[in-house]
Amino acid sequence: MAKQKNVFFCKECGYEASKWMGQCPACKSWDTFVEEKPLNTAEKRRGTAFLTEPEPLAKINTTENNRITTGLQEMDRVLGGGIVIGSLVLVGGDPGIGKSTLLLQICRELTDKMHRVLYISGEESLQQIKMRADRLGVFRGDLLLLSETNLDNIEEIIRKDKPEIVVIDSIQTMYKEDIGAAPGSVSQVRETTGVLMHLAKGLDISIFIVGHVTKEGVVAGPRVLEHMVDTVLYFEGEDKASYRILRAVKNRFGSTNEIGVFEMQDQGLREVLNPSEFMLQGKPEGEPGSVVAASMEGTRPILVEVQALVCQTNFNMPRRTAAGTDYNRVNLLMAVLEKRVGIQMSGMDAYVNVAGGMKINEPALDLAIVLALLSSYRNLALDEHTICFGEIGLTGEIRGVGMAEQRVMEAEKMGFHTCILPKTNADNIKKSGMKLIGVKNIKELNRLFN
Ligand code: TYD
Ligand code: MG
């Protein structure tokens, strides 16, 4: 018999090739090929097929109650209204961001509501999980714990115990014996996820899979994993900031625009039900260079503070930085200011920062960035009860943005009373308790300071 040759997989997208390549032909990333043992055909075939008969669409029953609410509002919103029974959810994120903590808290809420939950950890011993649980507070329900990495054993236990919800922490530690590769390798991650998918769909169990993100910003064997699961959630946050954002990047059962906001505290994660209030904590009052913007995250308006500092440069080339927003966008907006308003920005250093550590790439933030730059340049503060939003074009025109009404309503709720917004948006808002200042061109912005 001919010796079985090893194959090469792309770590990023799972592309399979018979020889090593510098660049992956499928996802175009460089230096991502790793050598692994090939899967034999029987294993391959078991991947996706379900052994059932075709059924007419009309005969398939869907019950109304096919979602389980977790009790954490932020989580339910991101999932699209609770956990869909029989769904496979991937929770990705950097190591140490709080994935295990989040899932353990969900387990607590679920067991409180008398659901049967099994938490399987391949990373921590039972004692360590218990220590974390103690830190989170009282667990009233009966949460089943298992410390195991062999997926064959896990499969057997799941089939025997039939829990409603299973957590696998993390997929990179799980392995199947008959696959020669090491845990965390592309073939292991792919095969183990395949088995879990089968269990989820076959037994109507909802399974959460934790996946660590590698340096490149993707879960190892990631796109393979992403298209196998129903929902992909990313848990992200700044290193220093305590808040965490849960974001859906794929959701077969809901929108991918929603975010959930949490704060990491000593006793676990706390839901932040009013992110605007959280983001505006510590905002200076009446200071030049500080402006509040109304931004949208999905269907949810969030007010954030945009800060700018403009000062004479000491270098040949002025320094510019942008934290929490797009650097190139800031440069572009400065060029527009220079050309259309006639402000000499080329001799100026400029630092722009979205306070609180949020990352916002929405064009509606443009107006806030420009106002903050102008405010700092002229050393004049904007009225502190003012918010703004609007997109700015290259000719200096201020263009309308979506969901203007929601933004204005959020600002009103948070106690602001003036809103600077695109003229087209202002004309469309019929009734508002706020004073609306519609602007058409950035030339008009100068008169807002005095
Ligand atoms: P963890 O959930 O272990 O991260 P992951 O599973 O994503 O790797 O979170 C670990 C971090 O969270 C750690 O730095 C400590 C911090 N933490 C708290 O601040 N408060 C808490 O109550 C807990 C349990 C963890
Ligand atoms: Mg963990």
Image (cartoon, rainbow, N blue to C red):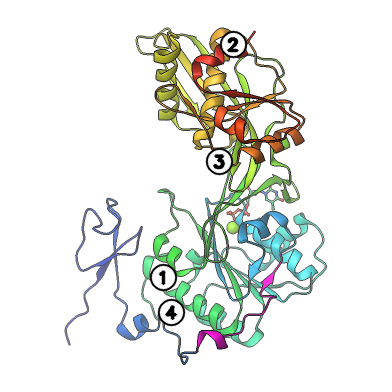
Query: Does the magenta run of residues contain 61?
Result: yes
Q: Residue at x 72, y 49 (%)?
A: 271
**Comparing marks 1 and 3, which lies closer to the viewer?**
3
For image coordinates 61% across by 61% down, the residue present is 79
| Residue receiving disc 4 | 177
Q: Residues within 10 Å of mark 4 (few under 14, many from 20)?
A: few
Numbered range of the magenta stretch: 56-69
Magenta-drawn stretch, dominant element (helix, strand or loop): loop
Q: Secondary structure at mark 4?
A: loop
The relative height of residue 334 versus residue 408 in the rendered view (above or below) is above
| Above or below, comparing residue 266 to residue 136 in the picture | above
Task: Give the foreground label among 4 and 1.
Answer: 1
Q: Which residue is mark 1?
A: 190
SS type, badge 1: helix
Q: Please, what secondary structure does the residue beneath circle 2 have?
A: helix
Q: Which residue is mark 3?
A: 402
